[in-house]
Image (cartoon, coloured by chain):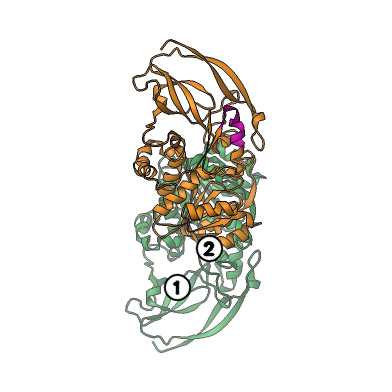
Chain colours: A orange, B green
Amino acid sequence: MPAVKVLNKQWIYAQRPSGRVGSEHYQLREVEVDSELAHNEVLIKAEYISVDPYMRIQQAERNSFDVPHPLGAVQGAGAVARVIASKSDQFKEGDWVLSYSGWQLFAKCHANDLNKIDAAAAPVTTALGVLGMPGRTAWFGIMEAGRPKPGEVVVVVVVVVVSGAAGAVGSLVVQFAKKAGCRVYGIAGGASKCEFLTSKLGLDGAIDYRKFNDADSLSAEIQKLTHGVDIYFDNVGGMITDAIIPQLKLRGRVIICGQISQYDGGIDKPNMGPRFLQHLLFQRATIQGILARDYTHRMNEMLEIVSPWVRNKEIVFEETIVEGFDKLPGALNSLFEGANVGKLLVSV
Amino acid sequence: MPAVKVLNKQWIYAQRPSGRVGSEHYQLREVEVDSELAHNEVLIKAEYISVDPYMRIQQAERNSFDVPHPLGAVQGAGAVARVIASKSDQFKEGDWVLSYSGWQLFAKCHANDLNKIDAAAAPVTTALGVLGMPGRTAWFGIMEAGRPKPGEVVVVVVVVVVSGAAGAVGSLVVQFAKKAGCRVYGIAGGASKCEFLTSKLGLDGAIDYRKFNDADSLSAEIQKLTHGVDIYFDNVGGMITDAIIPQLKLRGRVIICGQISQYDGGIDKPNMGPRFLQHLLFQRATIQGILARDYTHRMNEMLEIVSPWVRNKEIVFEETIVEGFDKLPGALNSLFEGANVGKLLVSV
């Protein structure tokens, strides 16, 4: 194919938010990109771009799991894309690929940075969800860090107002824990979400945390329902975590997968909460932080088990797909407002 | 030996303290005990009675690792005692034994509840210190939960004003960590204690936490000295823990062995502190609570390694011995005032 020029659109991360992220923290840039490729280069066009809670962590000023996201650069993000042109033996025009090309329509990538997606095996969007980073986080988080045993009690915060996006990982964790033979309870905001958890995901119970004004009363309800917690999968932190930690049983395990309640400023300047380390002592419990990247090299282990479940529709994986490249900053913001259920994507 | 009657003295735990424990929470009781023994019973006379920080946890109203210590009962405690009379084949008059007979001079015990002490192998008081519960806590805490590797950085709070007793465990942990090849730093209150840590225990550095008014400035000093922490052995909690957690390195391990700063009321009604779970996420770090009792069945593993070190004087183990049965409540109180170095005992 002869070299062509296309107009690329990019969302540039321009300003650090102090609280909630919004469109004022991004700038839209249009630049031309051509299809002249070096050896092993591939030109891709994004079709679905991911928005994930971790992005808000990187926007903080202080180092987290990475140095802060640089200002003036394209917002980093995973994308499901199609190959437009290729100088790699591994990829040809029309291939579906997973890339980390960020919030932009087009990108030139090295072939080694792309992963081919088998569009016949599962919907391509699953590469950003159940069969991608959120699925990996859920799988290794609960199975490796959580070590669930049949009959154990697992509590997961699935959907909360401040962290609707927790649905992407949380709604998978609860299903994996059920398959491991656990009694599984979800914590969510609102009656309809709780109904979703028990009727559609088959959980043993769900608590609408909005009915509780403080950690103590929520804690009492969790105790009443569960009679103690073996595994707590935490992607929210804050008051819900305060309520659950005193309910941990002997050798309980807490998996810290996210702390969404802290992302609107609590990273740079910590919020205050009740001290709780004495509970770990009393119960000889463990808290462990995990990130999806810790298990990237073991992705195939997870896919071998979870892909057939997806194929056989044994796993419910919800997606919310927003239309339009211009919607990206707003979509990231909406993660923290709990509007969506399941994995949030922007089709572009 | 014909049956004799002796006057027993007991400290009865009489009232729950809301803050610092004092003599007003105990009542001295005198009762007669006779030496009439059933089969397998042994009458012992305590010689050294232990005071330990964990006792303060059990005085709280809420369940901790046990139900609360009952009111109106002899304060539970370990003791090094001698056999006065025995109807057991395992013990004879004059034997030294370790018992959990509490704060009383005499006790009738079942032979199965006593452990013989070899007085020729080491000073008998070591059964309550380096070769006893504190030694076991230090050994399994650092070696099993901490998993030290040569060259790693270990930080231990050894002696602080609010928790002088931490010396009993902390001063052993630092030495075990040195033997494991780590760079080891201590945190202590006052220049002379820091000097003790570096010159006498051979630590790589020590920080006098009293020079710092807040967690942030202490944290900066820890960063300057250590360049990041692989293992934090925590028996204090509070501000010092707040300072260290942000300095954890990738896959850092925090061992919660005590939370002395929280014992004066923080168990029943938690103090507030900065939220920090995001740091565990960033560094994929682990926090684990441990208790000595988790490793009781493995005591011999530890003794095989540590007893020769004690015999060959390769381990420094300090003891503070207070004279007089009447001093027991005051000695427990003094644990929280940092007066002693090393293991605190009362000879009776």
Q: Relative to A198, does residue B92 appear above or below in the rendering?
A: below
Name the spot of residue A233 as percent of width and height, x first: 49, 50
- Asked whether residue A133 appears in the rendered view, the answer is yes
Q: CA distance from mark 1 to mark 2?
A: 48 Å
- Of residues A72 and B208, the one drawn nearer to the viewer in this rendering: A72
Residue under label 2: A225
Q: Residue furthest left?
A: B89
In the picture, the quarter occupied by the N terminus of chain A is top left
- Letter of the chain that mark 1 sits on in the rendering: B
Residue at x 49%, y 21% (from the top left corner)? A107
Disc 1 target residue: B81
Q: Regarding mark 1 in the picture, which secondary structure is present there?
A: strand
Question: Residue B308 is drawn in which quadrant?
Answer: bottom left
Q: Which residues are magenta?
A: A323-333
Q: Position of residue A28 (x, y in %)?
A: 61, 23
Q: Quadrant of residue B36?
A: bottom left
Q: Can residue B231 be seen at all in this image of the molecule?
A: no
Is residue A309 located in the magenta-colored stretch of the structure? no
Which residue is at 56% across, 72% downward?
B324
Badge 1 density bin: few <14, some 14–19, many ≥20, Cα 10 Å: many
Give the amino acid type for the residue marked by disc 1 in the picture.
Answer: Ala
Which amino acid type is shown beneath numbered disc 2? Leu
Q: Which mark is residue B29?
A: none
Chain that bears disc 2: A
Is residue A327 rendered magenta in the image?
A: yes
Per the picture, the main secondary structure of the magenta-coloured stretch is helix
Q: Position of residue A80 (x, y in %)?
A: 46, 30
User: Viewer-proximal residue, A323 or A254?
Assistant: A323
